[in-house]
């Protein structure tokens, strides 16, 4: 994958991790999980995901820098704009990242988060 895409994936995963408050930094393991999932996707889907991710990373230039170089507030705003976009592919890309990042975050070594445990057994 290109450096722009790798850095964008890492920044998206870190932002979702911060938003969710699950686990803690670093989020390198989450980004690695997402990258593997993209690499393992069928080629037609992999190309679309990589292209959309690169485009998303370049859209940060509206804020003055690539997405991965923006401060967290501007990153969050860009992600929220894409989550609420009228364009389905933009929303779908964010759903893709939200889903995979949350799966990786809540699958970290500790298992379920404390609020999810059933202590009645």
Image (cartoon, grey):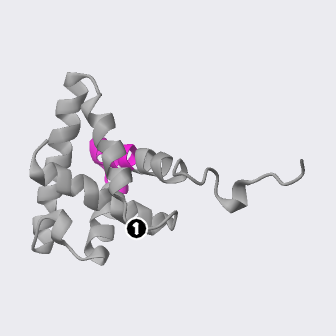
Q: Is residue 92 visible?
A: no
| Overall secondary structure of the magenta section | helix
The spot of residue 18 in percent (x, y) is 42, 68
Element type at mark 1 = loop
Q: Is residue 15 above or below residue 57?
A: below
The spot of residue 80 in percent (x, y) is 35, 63
Residue positioned 89% across, 47% down in the render:
121
Residue sitting nearer the eye, 104 or 57: 104
Residue positioned 37% across, 65% down in the render:
26
- Residue 45 falls in which quadrant of the image? top left
Which contiguous range is marked in magenta? 83-97
Residue sitting nearer the eye, 90 or 60: 60
Q: Which residue is mark 1?
A: 25
Q: Residue furthest right?
A: 120
The spot of residue 20 in percent (x, y) is 49, 64
* Residue 54 as seen in the image, left or right of residue 112: left
């Amino acid at each position: 994958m290109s450096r722009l895409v790798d850095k964008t994936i890492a920044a998206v995963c870190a932002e979702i991790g911060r938003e969710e408050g699950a686990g803690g930094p670093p989020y390198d393991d989450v980004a690695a999980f997402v990258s593997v999932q993209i690499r393992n996707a069928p080629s037609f889907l992999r190309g679309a995901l990589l292209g959309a991710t690169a485009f998303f990373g370049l859209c940060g230039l509206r804020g003055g820098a690539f997405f991965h170089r923006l401060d967290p507030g501007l990153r969050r705003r860009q992600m929220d704009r894409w989550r609420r976009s009228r364009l389905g592919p933009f929303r779908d890309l964010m759903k893709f990242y939200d889903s995979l990042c949350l799966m990786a975050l809540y699958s970290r070594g500790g298992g379920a988060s404390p609020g999810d445990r059933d202590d009645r057994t």
